[in-house]
């Protein structure tokens, strides 16, 4: 996996819209985020520009409108964020993460069965 750009929490709001539906025009993004986040048009344009500079999104000019597409998939983002969290919090130790999770969370019998099945499948591969 190539090195992905760091996407801030605020930039994530823009990316989330594009992951849900692409392409979106700048106006569509601005309309949705001004309603949801109460950000100004200029703030949203700044996030779009930052994401473009980071190569997380691309745009095409269609007539007088700019239309945006994600260059980073949701799956790539989640994988990168998971790895970052694991490295930062657990020093890369997956076992510690799962042990802590299993200790702290209430797991149903189905959850336990599903986890056992996943571990068995992982053991085979």
Image: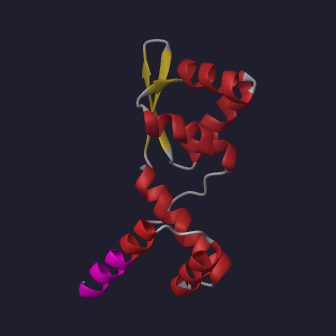
Q: Among all residues in the image, which is located at the extreme top?
A: 64
Nearer the observer, 60 or 83: 83
Q: Which image quarter: residue 123?
A: bottom left
- Name which residue lies at 61% across and 70% down: 105
Give the main secondary structure, helix, strand or loop, of the magenta stretch.
helix
Colour theme: secondary structure
Does residue 89 appear in the picture of this structure? Answer: yes
The percent coordinates of residue 45 (x first, y second) are 65, 29
Q: Which residues are magenta?
A: 116-124
| Magenta span contains residue 121 | yes
Classify 8 as above or below 80.
above
Decide if residue 97 is on the left or right side of residue 76: right
Nearer the observer, 64 or 74: 74
Nearer the observer, 101 or 54: 101
**In what quadrant of the picture does the C terminus appear?**
bottom left
Q: Among all residues in the image, which is located at the extreme left?
A: 124
- Name which residue lies at 49% across and 67% down: 108
- Name which residue lies at 49% across and 58% down: 78
Decide if residue 34 is on the left or right side of residue 114: right
- Name which residue lies at 53% across and 69% down: 107
**In what quadrant of the picture does the N terminus appear?**
bottom left
């Amino acid at each position: 996996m190539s090195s992905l750009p760091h996407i801030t929490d605020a930039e994530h709001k823009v990316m989330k819209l594009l992951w849900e539906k692409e392409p979106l025009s700048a106006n569509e993004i601005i309309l949705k985020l001004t309603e949801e986040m109460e950000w100004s048009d200029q703030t949203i344009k700044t996030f779009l520009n930052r994401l473009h500079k980071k190569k997380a999104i691309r745009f095409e000019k269609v007539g007088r409108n700019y239309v945006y597409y994600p260059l980073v998939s949701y799956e790539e983002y989640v994988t990168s964020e998971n790895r970052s969290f694991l490295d930062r919090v657990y020093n890369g130790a997956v076992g510690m993460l799962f042990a802590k999770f299993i200790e702290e969370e209430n797991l149903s019998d189905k959850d336990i069965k599903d986890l056992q099945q996943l571990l068995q499948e992982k053991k085979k591969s």
